[in-house]
Image: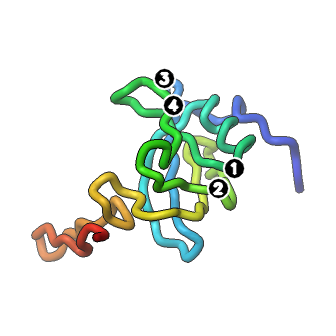
Amino acid sequence: MTATFDPATLRYTADGLIPAIAQDEGGEVLMMAWMTRETVAETLATGRVCYWSRSRQAFWRKGETSGHVQTLIEMRVDCDRDCLLMTVRQEGPACHTNRRSCFYTAIRDGREVITSDPIA
């Protein structure tokens, strides 16, 4: 089944946000960020991932200042229409700590273990 997609059909928080998970082509989860109806539409229109920065209250075009651009390969909507999963082509690290993924801290036997170093 196929239907025309409208970002307005998604279920946003009271603040107008929807969580978006970015994973690479191999399935590694790179990061989670927030999107708005407008950033979803821009991402789909341009193919370059655009998030909503809650701290700056502004569009956050991934890689705009760092050069670590995310190019959209595919966007998926979960069954409740309240979360997005994007497969992206990541240039450079995804995390602001200069790591490939934001999920570099594992909880093992009640201890936090750092699983990767920043990219040099």
Tell me where residue 32 appears, x and y as whole percent.
43, 51
Q: Between disc 4 and disc 3, whose residue precedes?
A: 3
The structure residue drawn at horizontal position 26% and vertical position 74%, both measured from the top left corner, is 116
For the point 34% across and 29% down, the residue is: 55
Contact between marks 4 and 1 (CB within 8 A): the answer is no
Label 3 SS = loop
Q: Are marks 2 and 3 in contact (CB under 8 Å)?
A: no
Q: In the picture shown, does residue 2 fall above or below 54?
A: below
Q: Regarding mark 4 in the picture, which secondary structure is present there?
A: strand
* First in sequence: mark 4 vs mark 1: 1
- Crowding at dot 1, Cα within 10 Å, few <14 / some 14-19 / many 20+, comes out as some
Q: Quadrant of residue 108?
A: bottom left
Question: What label does residue 59 carry, if any?
Answer: 4
Q: Which residue is mark 3?
A: 14
Q: CA distance from mark 4 to mark 1?
A: 15 Å
Marker count (numbered): 4
Question: What is the CA distance from the residue labelled 4 to the residue labelled 3?
Answer: 18 Å
User: Which mark sits nearer the N-terminus, 2 or 1?
Assistant: 1
Is label 2 in contact with label 1 (beta carbons under 8 Å)? yes
Q: Which residue is mark 1?
A: 47
- Identity of the amino acid at label 2? Leu
Q: Is residue 54 left or right of residue 41?
A: left
Residue named by callout 2 = 72
How far apart marks 2 and 1 lie (CA) works out to 5 Å
